[in-house]
Amino acid sequence: MAFPREQIRNFCIIAHIDHGKSTLADRLMELTDTVSARDMEEQLLDSMDIERERGITIKSTAVRMFYTAKDGRNYMLNLIDTPGHVDFTYEVSRALAACEGAVLVVDATQGIEAQTLANVYLALDNDLEIIPVINKIDLVSADPENAIHEIEDIIGLPAEDAPRISAKTGLNVEEVLERIVKDVPAPKGDPEKPLKALIFDSIYDNYKGALSYVRVMDGTVKPGDRIRFMHSGNEFDVTEVGVFNPAWQPVKELTAGEVGYISASIKSVAETKVGDTITLANNPAKEPLHGYKHANPMVFCGIYPADGADYEALKEALDKLILNDASISYEPETSQALGYGFRCGFLGLLHMEIAEERLEREFDLDLVTTAPSVIYRVIMLDGSIRLIDNPSNLPSPMEIQRMEEPMVSAHIMTPPEYVGSIMELCQEKRGVFLDMTYLEESRVKLSYTMPLNEIIFDFFDGLKSRSRGYASFDYELGDYMESDLVKLDFLLNGDMCDALSTIVHRDKAYAKGRAVAEKLQEVIPRQQFEIPIQAAIGGKIIARETVRAVRKDVLAKCYGGDITRKKKLLEKQKEGKKRMRQVGTVSVPSDAFMTVLRIN
Amino acid sequence: MQGIYVHIPFCKRKCRYCDFVSFPENGREDFYFVALISEMRKYAPLMKDRVFDTVFIGGGTPTCLKPGRIKALVNELENCFSIRENAEITCEANPESATCEKLKELKEAGVTRLSIGLQSADEGVLKAIGRIHTKEDFLSAVEAAKSLGFTNVNADVMHGLPLQDTESYLETLRLVTGLGLTHISSYALILEEGTPLYEDVNAGRVALPDPDETADMEDAGIAFLAEAGYRRYEISNFAKPGFECLHNLNYWDNGEYLGLGLNSHSALRLKGDWTRFNNTEVYAEYVNELGEGKLPVRNTQRIERDEEMFETIMLGLRKTEGVSRKAFLERFGVDPAEQYAPAIAELELDGMIEVTEERLFLNRRGMDFQNEALLKFMDQ
């Protein structure tokens, strides 16, 4: 017996990092007795360690709650959690497409941020009913009236009667549930039509394999059904369907309007791509749901084991990682400096950092990462086009007609007092100014066209430090644009170090070359001979530093009869050596490759 | 050769760079001595088949002990252990406490070799490293030693100290060589974690000479001492011919020694096994355990043959003479030149090591990069 569709509400929560999304989700679950408070970890929905530490949601997930509203009826509320970062815009859009409504959480102490705005627009594009909620009103610095004005002025949503809550203390949270019931439309859809289920997330489980998290738009699905993924064309037999309680709970069937998971002994999440439509093989829908996109990696870097002996371990770890995250690409590559490793592609910089952190933490690996790169389009003299994501593979300038780099439209929201220094930063990052609007007295929106390769280095950090953390930032990918790019190389004692090569704009090559050379001079330990460090474009040296030769490497005293102490010091020195990479004659500490990435 | 080391942990004040186990006496001396004597008596039966060639009383500051203590100590050593006639008996002394009376007691006790901690003759440098004596104190100590007939006297000096430059260091060397001392130990400062000097340097309150300046001092010192007739026989040790320190040579030959006192270290062949152990470094544990009739021993390790061989190389290559192939062959049944042929080949290529019929030794370049050389032996 299916739950009455008119009593189902599917919704998500949109909020900026730290504005209280997870805390609100916890309160909603408490109020609906979905989990007992004492069983609940602080932020239940964010289950990965890294998510919890960074206070953000990386993978979306979902939970089903039951709530008896003041009208006396029992409602099924499906909360679909969405990732909260610009790298995952596509995933957010698919999660939103699975809902009819969105709760917009705005921090009463901070107002609306660029990221929130971007997601609100995504929600509006998906025709979602938006319920504004003002959070953190328990704080002394709360200014709910201002937050309401911002919502009305910037987004154009009436917000005067927005619930004013404290997710932390639970104040007025029940009002949010009432508004969801009252304002979010019940899902449409026809259980009798051919199955159309939208995949809004997929998760790998060691026992069940890849699970598709779906919103059933039309039709019904149950164990034993043969299903087809409409974009990939693959077919599988359903072994289990279930709902989120929030733990997986098998049910007999999932029907139009419902949210749940489908398990079909699928080996990898690469088969269950977010945005794909699941239908029945023997009674397929005519058309898939629209909006499917293949999520292409945008940012690439080389990942190497700090100890060359760990190559196999790194390979296994990457294999396991992509079981859960099909948007990461990787293929083996070799570097003269770093040996055997992998060229890995990510959706964005944060995605890359999270993946690196997971590799180091969950798989206990020590990694060396090369500078991130975007994909450059290289138009050769003969007119052919090459896509280059690794500076080492850049053809010789003699063969190149021109080069193009990917651009983004960047939107920055900031209090007006930081506009000057943020514009300076954008200019430094080769941004082309598009527009500046006063959203209201205390908030300015700046729009720029910027090269993606400037954003992937230290743009976020720069923005934060120049605005004391007040500015927020969002971008969407734009077109490729011709650009005067050069490959910047570094030579250590005359030998080129491929792991340090980067592609940069010609105007910035000198400054960058000097800065990196200086940094290398600091991080490369003195060795038995003098080491010239040179930055070069083509054959031309543009900067030079020197690491002077070390004169002595000897322990002056032997600590009386304490031989073990001396031996320990030698062991330590030996360990240190293991973490060095050989570039020609020069030993370079693994960390050096990372430190030079952070150059201001 | 076999030696005995006795540790006296008391100092009037700890120097700012020092990380040895030492502290002010504060009424502890009598208890310490009771413990030390019971330790000797407990070892006596275990050591009855051994004849010791050297004794080294180090610290801390042995000369800050109460009058008569060192005499009593040496007496007890002679009661408990058989010590060869004409054994080398060294006692460390600090200039401020090496008074004529104290040195007289040492002489009477049978001490044959004095080792005086000067560190620097530059008053500014002395102050910067927290020494409590002056250059004058040192001069009177040396004069007293000479007048009492000590003919084998070492001065400990250091380089790489705060406020020090090459000239200041050479001035110190001129002073000690000018006084006709027979032995000079010259150590480069090792900035040890946890010492006040380490904190000062890290906080930027004190600047040390940079590594190049320190290397300059060292090289200038080596040249000066050679000129003055002192042979560099170990990385940091220089002696007039025939005045090398036998006790330390025994360490570098990876010989046997018994350590007595707080935090002292021992290396002995016990029932055929090469064995290392040390005493606790906690004063109360040392005194209490001996009070209960137990030896306060920690970290006993049986050293495997490979490890013992590596130790022999590691220590032996500190000497300019290096490792005797014959002695090594006798001890391990294998010629070190064969045992370590790959490492030696690499080091020869690097211009660091030399091998003759009798010995393998590091040349000047090899001495400068000794750690590098040892890592080659370790890795092989």
Image (tube, coloured by chain):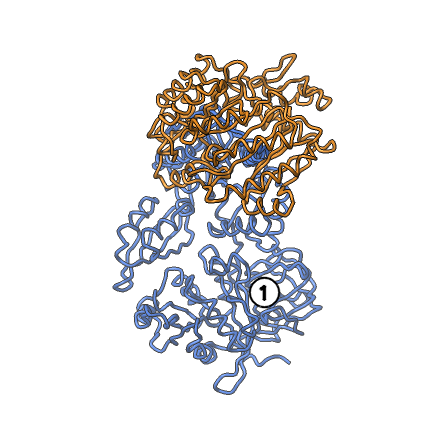
Q: Nearer the viewer, residue B14 or B198?
A: B14
Can you see residue B380?
Answer: no
| Rendered residue at 69%/69% (across/down) | A223
Residue B304 x/y as whole percent = 70, 33
In the rendered view, would you say A496 is above or below A420? above
B97 left or right of B357 in image? left
In the rendered view, would you say A500 is above or below B181? below
**Amino acid type, label 1:** Tyr
Q: Secondary structure at mark 1?
A: strand
Residue B323, by quadrant, is: top right
A284 left or right of A16 in image? right
| Rendered residue at 62%/68% (across/down) | A248
Specify the quadrant that holds the C terminus of chain B.
Answer: top right
Residue A71 x/y as whole percent = 48, 87
Specify the quadrant that holds the N terminus of chain B.
Answer: top right
Residue B137, by quadrant, is: top left
Q: From the image, tell me which residue sits under label 1.
A: A213
Chain that the image shows in blue: A
Q: Residues within 10 Å of mark 1 (few under 14, many from 20)?
A: many
In the rendered view, would you say B250 is above or below B358? below
Q: How many marks?
A: 1
Residue A181 x/y as whole percent = 48, 79
Q: Nearer the viewer, residue A99 or B201?
A: B201
- In the rendered image of the structure, the colour used to display chain B is orange
Can you see residue A39?
Answer: yes
